[in-house]
Amino acid sequence: MATIKDVAGAAGVSVATVSRVLNDNGYVHEETRTRVIAAMEKLNYYPNEVARSLYKRESRLIGLLLPDITNPFFPQLARGAEDELNREGYRLIFGNSDEELKKELEYLQTFKQNHVAGIIAATNYPDLEEYSGMNHPVVFLDRTPEGAPSVSSDGYTGGKLAAEAIIYGKSRLITLLRGPAHLPTAQDRFNGALEILQQAEADFQVIETASFSFEDAQSMAKELFAAYPETDGVIASNDIQAAAVLHEALRLGRNVPEDIQIIGYDDIPQSELLFPPLSTIKQPAYDMGKEAAKLLLRIIKKQPLTETAIQMPVTYIRRKTTRKEDYDA
Amino acid sequence: MATIKDVAGAAGVSVATVSRVLNDNGYVHEETRTRVIAAMEKLNYYPNEVARSLYKRESRLIGLLLPDITNPFFPQLARGAEDELNREGYRLIFGNSDEELKKELEYLQTFKQNHVAGIIAATNYPDLEEYSGMNHPVVFLDRTPEGAPSVSSDGYTGGKLAAEAIIYGKSRLITLLRGPAHLPTAQDRFNGALEILQQAEADFQVIETASFSFEDAQSMAKELFAAYPETDGVIASNDIQAAAVLHEALRLGRNVPEDIQIIGYDDIPQSELLFPPLSTIKQPAYDMGKEAAKLLLRIIKKQPLTETAIQMPVTYIRRKTTRKEDYDA
């Protein structure tokens, strides 16, 4: 296989000159440039990405940090980012932090050592020095630290929409699930819902939930009906929780939505397959990933930015676990 | 930041010598080695992964190729692989092929250009020259090309277990869903089920399914009940299909499992949250990813191998969509 040295030798120039041609930076005489490219073609040399990244101190790799790809919200995000990056010839190095600082720092180190061209991070630690001290761009996903480029969806409005749906359907004793306290996204939707319930002077209680895991959702659902058997409306913090509540309600012989309304959050693909199909607040996960990639590529290419904190709209998807607004209780 | 050149200068040796020390290959006099390491420490030099990969022609990156991470079977696989690789200091470059040859070749090219240390591939094209011509190891996941290292699960037995469960529960008119014809894994489970149904001289029909997508599953379920309204047992090719069939059966007012039994395949985390919870054949997805990573690392480190074609066991998980074996029809 031909190396950059062979190309330099064949073209009668220095390796540094070949490097400048490869990376299209620094001055190279037009006649020299043509000679170098001819040598590359003759030797069937294709720029080695590793060598290229060494000369340029940057690669065509993008670091993607997610909390956990097995949470069904995140594969959509990852696909959106990947599909957009692919169109531009970029690839992903990918890692799950499990919301652990140690794992996150290890991945950031890996990204740096591989000279990624940029990072997309769904992190609980956007204020880490490791982010501000990076010499490549970072776009925060699902988080909006002040002044930093980010893509998120409007969780506060989402929470309001969810609570409004339950109130329109005339639930009398509402249970509001508060997602993990350390997740700003979960707290935004919680606060939005809280505001509407308070405004409406609704009768409601709050249940704290520790995580978004399947196991926690199942035990939470059991505890919910044990503690509040009379509840007739549940506002969940994500679709997994809502599915667990729906499961438990049906298991206890409740009719949904006649006896109890349930609304989720996210609109993961599985929610439509539940029976009755789950009403929920849709976050445009795939498009959020896509927008984050687009924003990052604009920053990498030093293109002008119209906005750096992109907030995507959320929508209420009424399926069959909430009642119509003109429901006659 | 210190470079390898600075280290060489400070130690009074050549860059090649520093490189040999870094990579622990070739002969280096012990006294020289100590001097180089002292210089590294003094200059606070840490081996740049890109430079390291250039010298070694290999990195701490592993390429992972999956069909589609939004298919809920694959995040578990990916996590299993990632968790195991992480423990050994390896990271993932990750891509979805969408089962398209063009995308797959592009990712393989990316893996090569970044000098991955190895590849884990869930591919429909294990016989590609690009795989055999690689000069780094490849472990096939979910596919078992002759003679190549691979990790899969026992689909044929899985299909048999699924059909046996439906027959034990005394379904009279069984529908067997044949997964995508081009996927050997889908055909293995199909053939296993077929054998049992034929042995039992069961009354059954086969429905072809084009893909594992959510949309196709939903339309397939509608067509199934339109074509065979009398069917009282469905053997699905994965859990998404089974969820769609369960949804449609409930929507049509059927009681599950009293009127109709349904069995899935995979045991994705969501299946337990369905109501009634889905009976299914469990593939140990997380462990399959982990085993693939372990096998790959053993090959990379040139450790002795006891087996190279690892087949993981599958198990029947009876939940509430199949009847007990002593069901009285």
Image (cartoon, coloured by chain):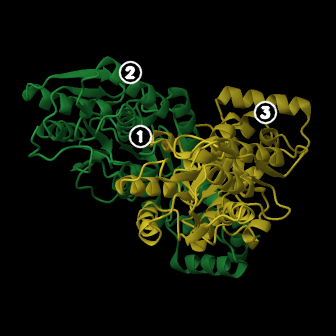
Chain colours: A yellow, B green
Q: Chain of mark 3?
A: A
Residue B188 placement: quadrant: top left
Cα distance in 3D space between marks 3 and 1? 40 Å
Quadrant assignment for the N terminus of chain A: top right
> Residue B223: where, in percent of width, then height?
38, 21
Q: Do tag 3 and tag 2 residues touch (Cβ < 8 Å)?
A: no
* Label 1 SS: loop
Mark 2: amino acid = Glu
Residue A183 placement: quadrant: bottom right
> Residue A13: where, in percent of width, then height?
80, 40
State left or right for residue A99 relative to residue B163.
Answer: right
- Residue at x 51% of width, y 28% of height: B100
- Residue at x 75% of width, y 27% of height: A38
Give the mark nearest the N terminus, 1 or 2.
1
* Label 3 SS: helix
Residue A36's disc is: 3
1 vs 2, front mark: 2
Q: Which residue is mark 1?
A: B122
Q: Are marks 1 and 2 on the same chain?
A: yes
Q: Which residue is mark 2?
A: B223
Q: Are marks 3 and 1 on the same chain?
A: no
Q: Chain of mark 1?
A: B
Cα distance in 3D space between marks 1 and 2? 30 Å
Q: Are marks 3 and 2 on the same chain?
A: no
State left or right for residue B106 relative to residue A143.
Answer: left
Foreground residue among A81 and B119:
A81
